[in-house]
Image (cartoon, rainbow, N blue to C red):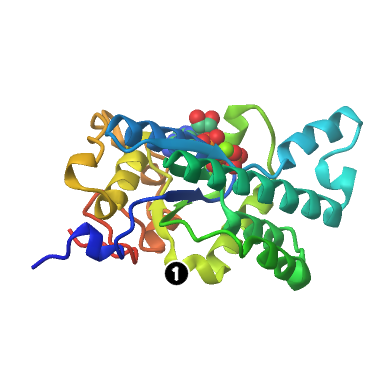
Amino acid sequence: MAPTLQERHGGGRLRSVALVGIDGSGKTTQAHRLADALTSAGVPATYWQNAGGRRWFSRLARKLGRRDAQRLLGRDGMLFAESALRWLAIARALLRSRLRSRVAVMDRYAVCQYASIRAHGGGRRWEGLARVLYRLFPPPDVTFLLAVEPGEAYRRIEARGTDHENIDFLAAGVAAYRSLPEFAGFVVVDANRSPDEVTRAIQRGLRDWLPAEDVPPDPAPDPAPDRCAAASRPDAAGPGDRLGAVGGGGKVGRDGSIDG
Ligand SMILES: Nc1ncnc2c1ncn2[C@@H]1O[C@H](COP(=O)(O)OP(=O)(O)OP(=O)(O)O)[C@@H](O)[C@H]1O
Ligand SMILES: [Mg+2]
């Protein structure tokens, strides 16, 4: 007999879902959609932006005539500020979600700080320190890694027009996420595709966690799925495909396996 939801998750209900990945991978877009879809389906959920302040500091740096945040605060200064600000944001999000009994939909989580430290060359000392500080936070019930090609992320960031990112840094970010010990526990979603396709993959990934009646309905089918970036390239397999991403298919178990 198939295990019940209670048995599958040790009696616990869904408390937190994290969306992680490089800049431009679509975390904010998808986290808002997920919080709205869960709430509409009767599972009250709140979106939380767990920012580390890097974009804000970059804007300040440019106003002060520096190229970016790192030129303003130095690499270590920025890593310290980012680690501290993100820690405070996550602590606040967890606390408020628990008090209100709402699912926390996390736009970035602790692993993003470890990946940032790796991508910025912060070394073991910084990562060790961050891990000590962030150990306080429980791992999310599900962590979706939105896997996107650096070139696609770069194009999205340029089109967004609120900030800039270096393509080599985006590639370093992809490598950093893949190198984390937590990577094996991520549910990897191919995020090169259209927003609706990514939304569907994320919602499928949560089916294992929710009673059937609480699974949000599928968003409208994508009218032009082959407009997605990965499919239009000759090397059509995006990073998610290479990583065993959640594609169009079935339900994803808690270990990231696809079983349907
Ligand atoms: N699947 C998608 N296909 C095309 N464009 C997308 C997709 N998802 C999001 N976008 C657009 O790309 C831009 C970046 O998306 P978003 O801000 O959600 O990314 P992010 O991962 O939160 O980035 P950051 O880490 O910089 O905050 C936005 O302008 C958004 O509208
Ligand atoms: Mg964002």
Rendered-image quadrant of the C terminus: bottom left
Q: Depth check: 25 or 225 in front?
A: 25
Q: Depth check: 59 or 44 in front?
A: 44
| Residue 148 visible in the displayed image | no
Asked if residue 34 is positioned above or below residue 124 in the image, the reply reads above
* Residue at figure coordinates x 68%, y 52% from the top left: 169
Q: Dividing the image into four equal quarters, which quarter contains ligand 2? A: top right
Asked if residue 33 is positioned above or below residue 186 in the image, the reply reads above
Give x and y (percent) for residue 199. 35, 39
Give x and y (percent) for residue 43. 32, 38
| Residue 174 visible in the displayed image | yes
* Residue at figure coordinates x 17%, y 45% from the top left: 212
Q: Which image quadrant for residue 217?
A: top left
* Residue at figure coordinates x 57%, y 69% from the top left: 179
| Within-10-Å neighbours for mark 1: few <14, some 14–19, many 20+ | few
Q: Is residue 222 left or right of residue 78?
A: left
Q: Depth check: 64 or 152 in front?
A: 64
Which residue in the structure is indicated by mark 1? 184
Asked if residue 89 is positioned above or below residue 5 in the image, the reply reads above
Q: Amino acid at mark 1?
A: Ala
Q: Is residue 78 left or right of residue 191?
A: right
Residue that protrudes farthest toward the front in the picture = 99
Give x and y (percent) for residue 225. 30, 36
Question: Is the CB atom of the residue marked by disc 1 within 8 angstroms of ligand 1's nearest atom?
Answer: no
Q: Secondary structure at mark 1?
A: helix
